[in-house]
Amino acid sequence: MRRSLLLLTAATTALVLTALLVPLTLLTRTHAADRTTAEATARAQWVAHALGPALAGPDERETAEQTVESVNTQDLPTTSIVLGDGTVIGPGPRGRVSDAVRLARTGRAFTYEPSTGGRQVLVPVQGATGGTAVVQVTVTERQLYAGTMTSWLVLAGIGVGLVLIGLLLADRLGARLVGATRRLAGTADRLAAGDLTARATPEGPPELRLVAGELNRLATRIDELLAAERENAADLAHRLRTPVAALRLDAETLLARSDSEEAHRVAADVAALERSVDDVIRKARRTFRDAPYADLAAVARERATFWLPLAEDQGRTTEIAAGEDAHPLPAPVPVSEDDLAAAIDALIGNVLDHTPQGTPFRVTVRTDPAGGTELTVADEGPGLPPTYAAERGTSGGGSTGLGLDIARRTAEDAGGTFAITSDATRGTRVTLTFPAAPPRPAETRPGPPAPTG
């Protein structure tokens, strides 16, 4: 925009100056010619007036020669006198008398442009001995337009100065417009990144100030709508507390009547459900300004450990690896623990629900030297159907089809990627990649020992 404004200003100024300066240059040329011609005419008339009485006397030739010699100086138009008998006194062509001289002898004073260039002024001198004499002043082309180049250079300097001033003003205006536009775009980028506190400062031309005001109104409205949505989600989750509380009482009653392993498992599942409802409420009320952060390795080990009893009941071999060995590896990613846990639960749940019992699976967390972190959940099952498409609501095993979509959105919302490969011989492999987040040692916690079984 700034460059375009400069080009437009330069082109417009150049056109305007061309329209003005071209006539001025022609006018200065004409003015210089007219001025030189007027001076030559005055010189010729003066010489004619001075020689009038002298040419009528006996010493006309000597007087004419002295007068011509006195007026012919360097860099001035040349003056000559053509006497009545055709004799030329002073510089000038000898020989045949020209038609212009014959015309001047009739008593007419005039100026004309010979074919050789320049101009000639002819003034007759009446009463000379031997006939009418003619004073002839010759102006060369260089003398005629003397001073024109200087005037042109002055006009060119004025034109260049005006163009530079125009470009300077256009650059300042362009810098103001571009700066205001970039700051407005920066505010929009912050809003797009989730910073709903970002507001634009109305500045620049009225149109940009109007856009800034409308953008601020939009940001405020989005903040209000999101706050309302978060409160609605929290209210809906809060309604689940009553049935969950009743379920917890039933689980406690069952546990009081029977101290079996199944009763303890039901009680633990109900407690986990109650914690999940609380997490949903906290997450719904969390604003976008809260910077998400979690240790992917720790969350992966925790969730894999959670699913380990069910995997053992199904006769599955489970392997959990963080890094190249089985030891915990800090892997901070810009995702909340709740979102990571939901994504990992969805992937492991798909393995447990849609592969034959006894199918082993592996959960791997690997850090990339470039700074990214990769989570892989791989099984050795029969693979996905050939017609399967990884889209929301699409399932190859009769489920809701939301599990893989939850994992995909978790990775992509954090700026990562989602990939899935599957075939009948090597099973299914789901890989999520996340950009690295700044480590927070105080929040990084090691997971339990890696189980295998």
Image: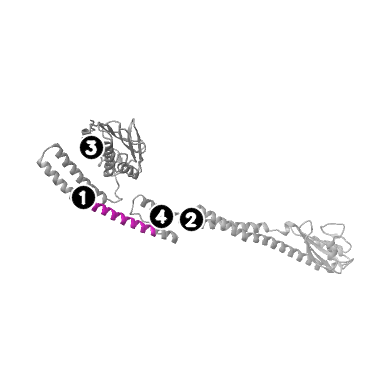
Closer-to-camera residue (331/66):
331
Contact between marks 4 and 1 (CB within 8 A): the answer is no
Q: Residues within 10 Å of mark 4 (few under 14, many from 20)?
A: many
Inter-mark Cα distance, 4 to 3: 49 Å
| For residue 398, side relative to residue 124 (left or right) | left
Q: Position of residue 288 (x, y in %)?
A: 31, 50
Query: Is residue 38 shown above or below 282?
Result: below
Picture disc at residue 307:
3
Of circles 2 and 1, which is in front?
1
In the picture, which quadrant includes the C terminus?
top left
**Range of magenta residues:** 213-239
Q: SS of the residue at dot 4?
A: helix
Q: Indicate which label's residue lies in the foreground, 4 or 1.
A: 1
Q: Nearer the viewer, residue 396 or 136?
A: 396
Of the residues shown, which amino acid type is indicated by label 3?
Trp
4 or 1: tag closer to the N-terminus: 4
Secondary structure at badge 1 equals loop
Task: Measuring from the top left, give residue 220's x and y in whole percent.
Answer: 33, 57
- Residue 240's label in the rendered image is 1
Q: Quadrant of residue 60?
A: bottom right
Q: Is residue 201 visible?
A: no
The amino acid beneath tag 1 is: Leu
Residue 438: x %, y % from top left: 31, 42
The residue indicated by pointer 2 is 174
Q: Marks 2 and 3, how far apart in space?
A: 62 Å
> Which element type, helix, strand or loop, lies under badge 2?
helix
Q: Pointers 2 and 3 in contact (CB under 8 A)?
A: no
Residue 296 belongs to the span the image colors magenta: no
Mark 4 → mark 1, Cα distance in angstroms: 43 Å
Main SS of residues in magenta: helix
Q: Is 294 left, or right, of 259 in this rendering? A: right
Which kind of residue does numbered mark 2 sit on? Gly
